[in-house]
Amino acid sequence: MPELAEVETVARGLRPLVGRTITAVRFGKTDFIDQPELLRALLPESRIGEVRRYGKLLAIGFARRRLDPERFWLLVHLGMTGQLVIQDSGLPAARHTHVWLGLEDGRELRYTDIRRFGRMQIVSAEGLAARVALLGADPLELGIAEFRQRLGTRRARVKALLLDQRVLRGLGNIYADESLWRARLHPMRSGSELSGTELVRLWRAIRTVVREAIRRGGTSVANYVDALGRRGTYQKRLRVYRRAGLACLRCGAKIGRIVVAGRTSHFCPRCQPRRAAIAPRRGNRNHHGKTDIPTPLLR
DNA sequence: AAGATTACCTGAAGGC
DNA sequence: TGCCTTCAGGTAATCT
């Protein structure tokens, strides 16, 4: 579910809680929490100092109010169906709510997760840094040079690269498909086979798609809601995702559906050809040192 | 190194 | 209505 745009929207919704203190912790199931006892021990009497997002990972910074001034971070990954919602403690909790963090003003920060693919844990500043070091670049922060370096040198399929959080952090199945459609690239193309122009197209497409998705509060195709329980509206802007069998909004061809990198991928077989639609020039040599075989220019 | 497969867990949707 | 299968926005482990 929650990809970069959704998690960013949740993070923004949580920021008004900065300065608030947790008064109580209550759990339902805890099998998705790393050391639930630690949360129970540290969170009460701790003040929310900061809310950050690294890709799909939420990091909520805390400081103990009394005792040691030690700071720590609550990491929350929403998985597929995780929700963090601020609610009045009087309201009945949704089914599958497993963590309640009471606030001094009578509200609660509640974590609900139907499938419990999400994860929660407390880490130190060093622990946070170690986690972030495993992640790739933020799609909105990296420049074209680094983008080229990170994708253009890899032989894996471009769809797999977009989904790999060590390459770029924050893209998931929806925004990967939407970005590839926008850039007119087949999901099975290899990173190293992409031309400079194609890489620029992809870099731009990702920025456009993700920025617009954030502006629209994310995509709600099933469960996703923000910290105030509101759905996003980017689902109205989707161009290929979940449109298999329908006409491509750019060329009219029938949108296809294949599995790439173990994930369902939607694409337009005409706009996103498997082979680069580049007219080869005489004497042009590809990376194998062989002359390019002319591929029919579609469209 | 990259890809395929499986697993984690629950619910929705479709076929019969 | 019920039963069965398939699929779902994520990630990690294991095998080839």
Image (cartoon, coloured by chain):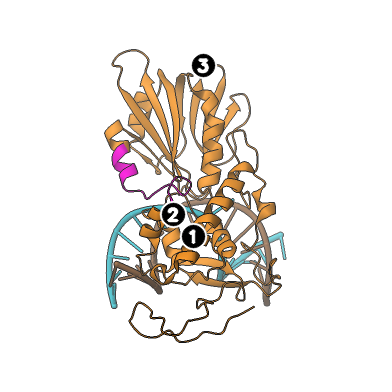
Chain colours: A orange, B brown, C cyan
**Helix, strand or loop under label 2:** helix
Quadrant placement of the C terminus of chain A: bottom right
1 and 3 marks in contact (CB < 8 Å): no
Q: Residue B2 at x, y = what percent? A: 35, 70
Across and down, in percent, residue A30 comes to 41, 39
Of badges 3 and 2, nearer the viewer stands 2
Question: Identity of the amino acid at label 1?
Answer: Val
Q: Which residue is mark 2?
A: A144
Residues drawn in magenta: A129-143
Image quadrant in which you'd find residue A225: top right
> Is the residue under label 2 in contact with that under label 1 (CB below 8 Å)?
yes
Q: Which of the marked residues, 1 or 2, is nearer the chain's N terminus? A: 2
The residue at which mark 3 appears reads as A104
The answer to whether one can see residue A261 in this image is no
- Whole-Å distance between the Cαs marked 1 and 2? 7 Å
Question: Closer to the N terminus: mark 3 or mark 2?
Answer: 3
Q: Please tell me if label 3 and label 2 are on a single chain.
A: yes
Q: CA distance from mark 3 to mark 2?
A: 46 Å
| For residue A110, side relative to residue A75 (left or right) | right
Predominant SS of the magenta segment: loop
- Observer-side mark, 1 or 3, equals 1
User: Which sits in the foreground, A187 or A235?
Assistant: A187
Which residue does the numbered mark 1 point to in the structure image? A200
Q: Residue furthest front?
A: A282
Q: Is residue A60 above or below residue A155?
A: above
